[in-house]
Amino acid sequence: MDVIDTLPPANANVRTEANAMNLPDELQRLLREVPALARAYLVGGCVRDALLGIPQKDFDLEVYGVDYETLARQLKAHGRVDLVGKSFGVIKFTGQSGGQWDFSLPRRDSKMSAGHKGFQIEVDPDIDPKVAASRRDFTINALAFDPRTGDYLDFFGGREDLVKRVLRHTNSAFVEDPLRVLRGMQFAARFDLTPAPETVELCRSIAHTFPELAVERVGMEWFKWAMMSQRPSAGLRFLQATGWLRHFPEIAALDGTPQDPEWHPEGDVFTHTCHCCDALAELPEWRAADATTRQVLMFAVLAHDFAKPQTTHEAEREGRMRIVSPGHEEQGGPLAEAFLTRIDAPNEIKDRVVPLVKHHLAHLQTVSDRSVRRLANFLKPATISELCLVMTADHFGRPPKPRVIHDGVTELRAKAEAMHLRDSAPKPLLQGRHLIARGMQPGVQFGTLLNEAFEAQLEGGFTDLDGALKWLDARN
């Protein structure tokens, strides 16, 4: 995801440029054959990502010099047209090969009232392209590319900002939508960008507008941060610099919470958390995971020390006073859940994050068959494999200490692998059908007995069905 050293020249060969953008053949054909697309430009993220060398999947096009009805009619001859975005000048097009692209007319957005719906949209196919680009949030997103000529439209220095890894707002209209600050947070993290000082100050000036944002919009930006970050700490430090960290009190409380310098030479808990998130993002296992699992793991690492501010104090350890935080792992579970609830995280994420937070120090306990069975059961639907990644990121987040996997993590992973519990929890061996086969009648007592059996199984009372049936016979 690094910025390529040499950006494509503006007058490069058309076909070469189109290939550089990885345009599908059908889209290239549309651009050649549909008259209404004579002044169609690729815009926004697809242009930015192409310059960053990121493989392209989605392409958005802005079309000038044609009215909405004409554009829709001409596109309809080549595929299916969906007009649900008409009020925004957007046509969703599905080609004959199944490709889907958004074609939009340029527009002006004028802030009329608070909230993300408080904008007046004015579609204008004859608008100056610079005026149309000015409504975009950051210079790196205000780029356009002409696939016919190979020219870039870069009115605000976006290409240079990409090379220099600078996140800079396009103009003062940035303040009209406070969501742009959270977009800045996830862009900084995704592309390892440093915010321009003037952008930081502008974001700081609108920190009070956070309540205007709908919770689902806030969550959307956090989910992108958790799923796509190259350097997650850049996003967290962006929130810190702009004064927006205070809107996420569990994270804000980490800032300034001390740690024992011998165990944590890197500094306070916020600094440690930043290092841990960055360490996780560098792990091959995290990069190879599915999108939801990446989110789960990143949120778990973000939240793993949420309870340190309320548990940290000085106490005597090994004959001298040390900074300690006993019980922070268990107390961190509810705080993680509260944070995730406020950003509208679905249960499939919360249900996995919370147990990972509560058990992130499990590698410091004695590893036995019993402890592994119980740990795997406590973690579900998360897994020991996922917990080991969280613990590894936690251990790596203490520079200048070397990044060495803790022996306890290695031992836990090996034991769980040997017991076939690395990626799943124990399943009850004794089932209702076994009770019926013993002549028992279904009823309330079934649940009680099966729970007792599973508890005995976790304790190591039996390890196979024969053992479970012997336990049942002895129990009765």
Image: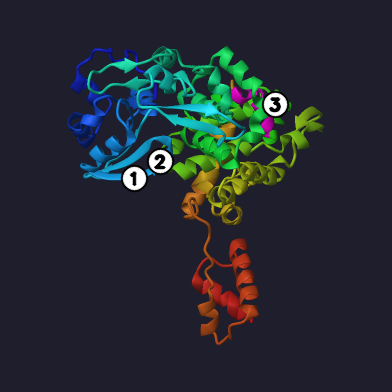
Q: Residues in magenta?
A: 237-248
Which amino acid, mark 2? Gly
At x 38%, y 15%, the residue is 154
For the question of whether residue 281 can be seen, the reply is: yes
- Residue matched to label 3: 255
**What is the spatial separation of the Cα atoms under label 2 and label 3, in whole angstroms?**
43 Å
Determine whether label 2 and label 1 are within 8 Å by CB: yes
Which amino acid, mark 1? Asp
Locate residue 433 relative to residue 322 in the image: left or right: left
Which label belongs to residue 85?
A: 2
Q: Secondary structure at mark 3?
A: loop
> In terms of depth relative to the viewer, which is nearer, 185 or 256?
185
Q: Is residue 410 above or below residue 259?
A: below
Which amino acid, mark 3? Asp
Picture quadrant of residue 259: top right
x and y percent of residue 444 in the render?
A: 64, 79
Locate residue 304 relative to residue 416 in the image: left or right: right
Position of the C terminus by quadrant: bottom right
Decide whether residue 246 is among the magenta residues. Answer: yes
Determine whether label 1 and label 3 are within 8 Å by CB: no
Q: Secondary structure at mark 2?
A: strand
Which numbered disc, 2 or 3, marks the residue closer to the eye?
Answer: 2
- Residue matched to label 1: 82
